[in-house]
Every structure is written in structure tokens, then in C-alpha cells.
Image (spheres, grey):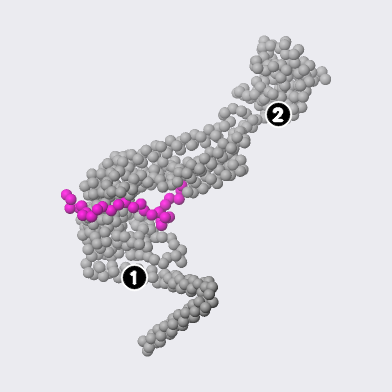
Amino acid sequence: MKNLYIFIAVLFIPWSFSLAKYDEFEDGDDIMEYDDNDFAEFEDVSEDTVTESPQRIITTEDDEEEATVELEGQDENQEDFDDADTQEGDTESEPYDDEEFEGYEEKPDASHSKNKDPITIVNVPAHLQNSWESYYMEILMVTGLLAYIMNYIIGKNKNNRLAHAWFNTHRELLESNFALVGDDGTNKEATSTGKLNQENEHIYNLWCSGRVCCEGMLIQLKFLKRQDLLNVLARMMRPASDQVQIKVTMNDEDMDTYVFAVGTRKALVRLQKEMQDLSEFCSDKPKSGAKYGLPDSLAILSEMGEVTEGMMDAKMIHFLTHYADKIDSVQFSDQFSGPKLMQEEGQLTKLPETKKTLLFTFNVPGSGNISPKDMESLLPLMSMVIYSIDKAKKFRLNREGKQKADKNRARVEENFLKLTHVQRQEAAQSRREEKKRAEKERIMNEEDPEKQRRLEEAALRREQKKLEKKQMKMKQIKVKAM
Amino acid sequence: RTAWRSPFPPARYKPPATETNPALEDPTPDYMNLLGMVFSMCGLMLKLKWCAWIAVYCSFISFANSRSSEDTKQMMSSFMLSISAVVMSYLQNPQPMSPPW
């Protein structure tokens, strides 16, 4: 009992220390109201007193910012304190003021329990400490989000500046070659907007038309996704370039029938697999262009040798050699229908629509680390495009070439028809069955029995006629065969 | 030099029909939208804070990659859902998030 009183008295010292410090605490207050922070001030509580009540362990931390407190069994002690509080609170706290505590660090009761259980320093889990430092994961997350937003703004602006730098460089050349520069399709009249269409934060379009021989030219500036931080990080692993893609749609009468492509070997291999027309008409592997003086990096895919001969004139070779680092692929095709459509077997009943097209894909050198000034280096490529338009109009196959080309196209169509023959048959069959069913339904729905009978007879007669016709045909074929 | 000028009125721009060529479209914004919604539902139902935070990131990424023709309503709704997942997780459990290691 005496020990208990001593213990309680000792515990009261730091407690009333807190009372003296914090004015808002009143003596009569229930201890239950005080949370862990108060006990955090008890840095100088004797370690020995801990052993008196093994359920309540008070320890100190090195930095002395907070005391870590284990709360097991505290409730029981609270009840003890309640009793003690009412009895001794007032009398005990008065004699203890600040001065009394100066020597308290020396722990007068240290001798009490040297040979008791060792102190276990327990780390209070983070969620019991109520300081903002424990929220470091959240702060990390918010910082990440802020970084993402910053990157979005910076990337968006950079792409914007690059696009406008490109346009400013090329504007003069375009306006001197096309009547309509810039159109978004929404105006009633065909007037030049003189502006790029922004499709995305990284894709800009420009439509030019109003020139002889070509229906129009669509320029797509496909920049890297600088506004997406994930993409920026991915590009650090795998470098990529900004691309300028130019698609010139030719008028039907202004281009002869041929399929031809030149570009980097890697690009051509990929295009041969992906593009419908290249895969059907250019069956050979990309050939080296060294014969014509092209650098090794470029290769040629062509429908026939005559086309290559015709395309590779001096000026074209000059363009290709000088700007080989910027050229990804150049494709001239009268059967252009875009990439192969992944359709199921049963759905393919018609050949995709084709259009006479010249397709140019240019890479902006620098693998993404470019400044707006670098866009000027693409200007000669636009001259090449315009030259190619004129050339495509002028180039005509000779008689032999034309025959070969026509044969090729007929062959491709035939192959396609053969493939889809079964499907078309099935489609026709199902259509016929549908018609029959519809007729039968009509007959069934007729309320008048007289009419019903008559319709049935009519249907029967029709069927008989069809059978007769078929028999006649078979007879004719037999006669012919004989 | 107007030899190049076409006598006919210039052709108008027609936006390419992307419905016929789904392969040409970039699927990233749609995937990220879906992922964001899945994570925010996980975060709300299972009361996992990290799920909710990842959902916020997904909706930001989806927004950054979105096409101009994309519906802003869907973007906003996925964003709001992820923010509400984060807020609800913290209201129910104000303790800080513990790292998985």
C-alpha cells in the first residue's frame, strides 16, 4: 500500500507539471480527457517507476520530441488515478512547482529497481502519432500529382510552340502553292483559316487544297506526348521522334496506276505488313536503292521495275539523299486504302475503297529534344512533296507497264473474290431464305381463307417455274459440254 | 505564278472517319478511364487508400492523353469519382497511409 502511494505520488509530479504549464487544464478534470500528447511531455519520468506498474511503460526517445507511450492497461490505471485524484490532487500538486522539478532528472528513486525487468523501447506505430510527418506518403502523392500537372502545362506549351514554328516556316510555301490553306470543315464558305487545327495536345492538322491535279493535302503534325509524364518517362527508355505526316489525295485522272514506296528499311518492312496495298502489290522484300545512288539507309518497294526507273529521277534522288535522315517513308499508290482492316472471316464481302494517294512520313531529327527553330529544317521536304505531286501527274506508264499493272489489279480482285466466294454465296442464300420466310408470313397473316389459298397457289407456281428454269439450264450446259 | 491554281473550287476538309478505323485510335485514354474507375471503386469499397490515389493518377493520365473529340463529361466524372474515393478513405480512416513494404 505504501509503495502504491509512493508510486502515485511520483507519477503525480510530472502530471501536475503539465498542469502548471497548461492553464486550460483544471484540477478537477478527468484524466480520461488527456490524450497522448500530454504524456509526451514526461521525458524525465523515472525508468524505475515503470516497473511498479508493468502495464504502463513510459520511455524516452533520443530526440526528445515525443515520448512513446504504450497504452495497454491504461484504463485500469485511470481508475486508480480517479480515486487518487479526488483525495490527493489538490494537496499534492501545490507544493510541486517548477523549481521543485529542476533536480528531478537525477531520479531520486533510481535505486529502487535496478535489478528489475529491462526496459523495452516500443515504437508507437505512425498512426498513433499525430504529427504531419507521419503523412509522408500522402505528401509524396500530392507532390507527384503536382509534378504531373507541371509537366502537362510545360509539355502542352512546347508542342504548341513547335507547331506554330512549323507553320510559320511553311506558311509562305504553302500559300504560294495552294489556294486554301487551313480549313476545319465548319465554315460555310471555303476560305483559308490560316490556322492549324488542334486535334489533341500533341496532334495538329492542316488541310490545304485548291491546286491542280491534287484533290487536297492533309498535313498532320504528330508530336511526342510531351504533356503526359508517363510518356516522357517511357521515352527515356525508348527514344522516339516527332513526325510530320503528309497525305496528298490525287484526282483520278491525274495519276497513273502504280504502287511504289521508298524509305528506311525498318519502316518499309513494317508498312509492307500493315498496309493493304503494299502487301498485295509489292510482294518482294524491300530492295536496296544503291543502284540509283541512294544511301544504304533507304530501301525501295515497288510494283515493277519500270515504276522505280520512272520515279528515281535526278531531282528525286537529290532530295532523298540530302534529307535521308529525315525521311521515314514515302508511298505513292493508286490503290491506297489505309492499313489492313482486321475483319472477321465472315464479314469481308467488299474490297475496301481505294483512293490515289501520295503519303509522306517525315521524322523530325533530334529524337524529341528539339527547339522551335529545328522546324525550319523541314522546309525543303515540303518542296519535295510539291515536286512529287507534279511528278506523279506527269509520270505515265508505257503500254507494257500499263498491261502489267492492269493484270496485277485484276489478279488481286480475283483473289479477293475467290476468298469471299463462299461468304457471298452464303449471303445470297440467306437473302433468298429471308424472302421466302417473309412471303410465308404474309400468307399466314392473311385472314381471308380464300386469299390465303390463292396466295399459296401463286407461291407454288413460282417455285415450279424456278425449278423448270434450273432444269433447262442444266440441260443447256450438258448440251454445250457435249 | 498561278499555273498551279485549280479552276474548280477547293475541296473542303473532311474529318477522317475514325469509326471505321478503330485501330488508328490510341486506346490509352479509354483504358486509363476504365482503370481509374475500377481503382476508385476498389478504394471506396475495400477502404484502401492507395487504390484511391492510383485512381486519381489514372484519371489525370486519361485527361492528358484525351482526344479533343472526347466527352469532357466522362473525364470529369471519372476525376470526381477518384477524388471522392480519396476523400472518403480519409474521412473513414484519418490515419496516414502505410507503405506496402
Is there one chain holding both mark 2 and mark 1?
A: yes
Is tag 2's residue or tag 1's residue first in the polypeptide sequence? 2
Type of amino acid at the residue the image marks with label 2: Leu
In the rendered image, the quadrant that contains the C terminus of chain A is: bottom left
Q: Residue at x 55, y 34 (%)?
A: A138
Percent coordinates x, y for residue A331 in the rendering: 30, 57
Q: Which residue in the protein does label 2 denote?
A: A71
Residue A399, image quadrant: bottom left
Q: Crowdedness of circle 2 by 10 Å Cα count: few (<14), some, many (20+)? A: few
Which secondary structure, mark 2? loop
In the rendered image, the quadrant that contains the N terminus of chain A is: top right
Residue A392, image quadrant: bottom left
Looking at the image, residue A106 sits to the left or right of residue A470; the answer is right
Q: Which mark is residue A411?
A: 1
The one nearer the camera, A402 or A301, is A402
Main SS, magenta residues: loop
Please say if A301 is above or below A190: below
Please say if A124 is above or below A212: above
Q: Is residue A317 visible?
A: no
Chain at numbered mark 2: A
Q: Which residues fall within the magenta stretch?
A: B1-29
Q: Is residue A461 visible?
A: yes
